[in-house]
Image (cartoon, rainbow, N blue to C red):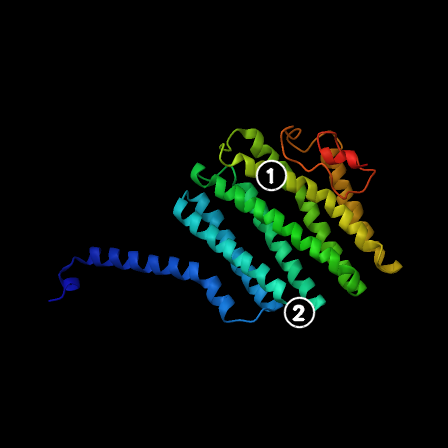
């Protein structure tokens, strides 16, 4: 009689669950590399990786809610790998219009990653706080890189594509308001550990500066558009300007002024005329 036949059924089932759980983890971690190895870069492959990143992001949020530290770590790895795979595929795509579509997908996913991770900063176990803060900073930086590439591509694309790019930038810049407020609240809450605080401060610097850079990028695009197409972009500029005035016009972001020791850049390509408060060093650029 084999060993399995001699074991109680409950032990056999326990071992089966352990094996299958391990297989799921292995498959999840291996999936991005397999997908990248067997497919050519295209808008479709970028969309597939973005879909995988979004699914993993939902798994991160669920794992944090269930206080499952191991599952949170695994899902974060999957989200990072899928997002990175989408970014790599975007760089390999040929054709300006196709690359612009892929860049919009990557920028939107990195923005979604950043939004969710910001909300989790105060909820995750202290052992994972630094990892979440690093992922947040990386996604904010990656988002801005994608938007900068989109802005550079815009003048070489048809007017309709330029309007689409402008609307995408405006949407992301508009959502920056909640990110700035949430990160500021996290910094002031006292719940961020010393190991994670520098990354959180850097994330706040990037998120604050990105809103102003978004306006500058929109203004750069609108000048290259034919007259009839400028209306939607000017509307987008007005909407983001209004959000900025609502956040910074009263002397600081929602939740209070940004702490003075944050490493906020002293110079940014921002338009003049906005009520940028003195606690943001790049206000001196005007």
Q: Nearer the viewer, residue 74 or 59?
A: 74
Question: Residue 94, which numbered label?
Answer: 2
Name the residue at the right extreme. Answer: 227
For this view, does 153 lie left or right of residue 146? right
Location of the C terminus by quadrant is: top right
Residue at x-position 71% and y-position 29%: 279
* Image position, residue 97 (x, y; %): 71, 67
Residue at x-position 74% and y-position 57%: 152
| Quadrant of the rendered image containing residue 156 | bottom right
Q: Nearer the viewer, residue 222 or 145?
A: 145
Residue at x-position 45% and y-position 44%: 64
- In this rendering, does residue 229 appear at all? yes
For this view, does 40 lie left or right of residue 15? right
* Image position, residue 95 (x, y; %): 69, 69
Does 259 appear above or below 268?
A: above
Does 77 appear above or below 189?
A: below
Nearest to N terminus: mark 1 or mark 2: 2
Residue at x-position 64% and y-position 38%: 205
Classify 10 Å Cα crowding around label 1: few (below 14), some (14-19), many (20 and above).
many
* Image position, residue 11 (x, y; %): 21, 55
Name the residue at the left extreme. Answer: 1
Does 39 appear above or below 163?
A: below
Question: Residue 202, which numbered label?
Answer: 1
* Image position, residue 135 (x, y; %): 53, 46
- Secondary structure under tag 2 reads loop
For this view, does 257 lie left or right of residue 199? right
Does 100 appear above or below 279?
A: below
Tag 1 and tag 2, C-beta contact below 8 Å: no
| Quadrant of the rendered image containing residue 89 | bottom right
Distance of mark 1 from mark 2, alpha carbons? 33 Å
């Amino acid at each position: 009689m084999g060993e399995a036949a001699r074991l109680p059924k409950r032990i056999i089932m326990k071992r089966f669950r352990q094996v299958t759980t391990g297989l799921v983890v292995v498959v999840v971690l291996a999936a991005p590399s397999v997908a990248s190895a067997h497919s050519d870069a295209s808008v479709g492959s970028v969309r597939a990786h973005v879909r995988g990143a979004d699914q993993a992001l939902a798994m991160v949020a669920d794992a944090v809610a269930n206080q499952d530290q191991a599952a949170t770590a695994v899902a974060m790895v999957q989200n990072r790998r899928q997002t990175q795979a989408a970014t790599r595929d975007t760089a390999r795509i040929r054709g300006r219009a196709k690359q612009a579509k892929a860049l919009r997908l990557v920028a939107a996913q990195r923005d979604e990653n950043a939004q969710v991770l910001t909300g989790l900063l105060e909820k995750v176990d202290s052992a994972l706080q630094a990892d979440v803060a690093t992922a947040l900073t990386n996604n904010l930086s990656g988002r801005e890189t994608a938007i900068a590439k989109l802005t550079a591509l815009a003048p070489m694309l048809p007017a309709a594509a330029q309007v689409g790019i402008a609307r995408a930038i405006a949407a992301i810049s508009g959502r920056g308001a909640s990110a700035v407020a949430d990160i500021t609240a996290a910094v002031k809450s006292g719940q961020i550990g010393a190991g994670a605080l520098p990354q959180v401060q850097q994330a706040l610097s990037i998120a604050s500066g990105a809103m102003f850079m978004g306006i500058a990028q929109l203004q750069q695009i609108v000048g290259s558009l034919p007259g009839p197409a400028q209306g939607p972009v000017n509307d987008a500029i007005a909407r983001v300007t209004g959000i900025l005035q609502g956040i910074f016009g009263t002397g600081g972001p929602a939740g209070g002024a940004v702490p003075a020791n944050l490493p906020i850049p002293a110079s940014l390509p921002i338009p003049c005329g906005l009520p940028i408060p003195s606690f943001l060093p790049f206000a001196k650029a005007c």
